[in-house]
Amino acid sequence: MHEFPLFGASIATASGYIPAGTCSLCGRSGSDRLRLGTGTDVIHTCGGCKREFAVPANKHEGVSVKCPGCAAAAPIRPLGDRPATCVPCLRNGRAAFTKDTEYGMVRWEGAIHGVTHGAPGLRAAGPGLALTDPNGEGWVGVMIPTTVLLELVRTPTYVTWQGDQWLFCCAAAMVYIGEWSQAEFISRAPSDPQACFLEVVEGAEPWMWGRVPKQIQPNSEWGFYIFTCYTCGRVRGHFDMT
């Protein structure tokens, strides 16, 4: 069983999951790979200055790129038609998945600098987090420790209809624990599961309780994605639909 501190659901439910094959980064065959598609980066180390830098997975065409630190040419090899990373390579920092969060997008480059890409006119973040000054277009980022953001981009992405929205609590990324059906809300609050639903799923309205599937099923028209805080135990969630 693989250890992902921020992904408490089964890896088989992750976006781009492939049960077996060859890793495009290390060449080893095995189980549990994750596709390197649009929005993923491969992390390289310059042979000269030893600086790490990211190259989008879809730009690995067997040419060289310039190291952003010393401008030396760094050769990169093609990743193949259907590139994927094994879990050890992802955990070791050889690949990074872009995450959309409640504080804006996070790519590897932003994670290294400890800041999210932000959102227009963002006015507040959670306790312990500071905002950047607005840029020329009014976008405001959130400053989050590099260790937190690097862990996030080294975590699988969960499957949604409209796109992920990773949530935060206690100045850290929360742990994704999966989609919930009515059964999970009933288990958490047997006396009033609908009230539990409205408390946990942000932006939900009472009529939406009827849209929560009684059991998780493939291709449900609605998705309710749940996170927990490993510090205080708080549970939060968001929803989307087809």
Image: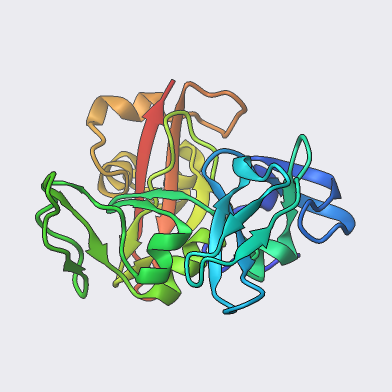
- Give the percent coordinates (x, y) of residue 93: 62, 68
Q: Which residue: 54% across, 64% down?
A: 67
Classify residue 32 as left or right of residue 98. Answer: right
Q: How is the image coloured?
A: rainbow
Viewed as shown, does residue 204 lie left or right of 172? Answer: left
Q: Does residue 157 appear anywhere in the picture?
A: no
Q: Position of residue 168 (x, y in %)?
A: 33, 61
Quarter holding the N terminus is bottom right
Residue at point 13%, 44% (across, down): 137
From the viewer's perspective, is residue 143 above or below residue 178? below
Q: Residue at x 51, y 59 (%)?
A: 153
- x and y percentages locating residue 35 in the rendered image: 68, 43
Instruction: Work out which residue is located at the far bottom of the displayed protein and give it.
Output: 49
Q: Position of residue 135 (x, y in %)?
A: 14, 53
Q: Say which of 222 and 78 sits in front.
A: 78
- For this rendering, which residue is in front, 191 or 160? 160
Quadrant of the frame with the C terminus: top left
Work out whether residue 144 can be spotted: yes
Residue sitting at 52 percent across and 63 percent down?
6
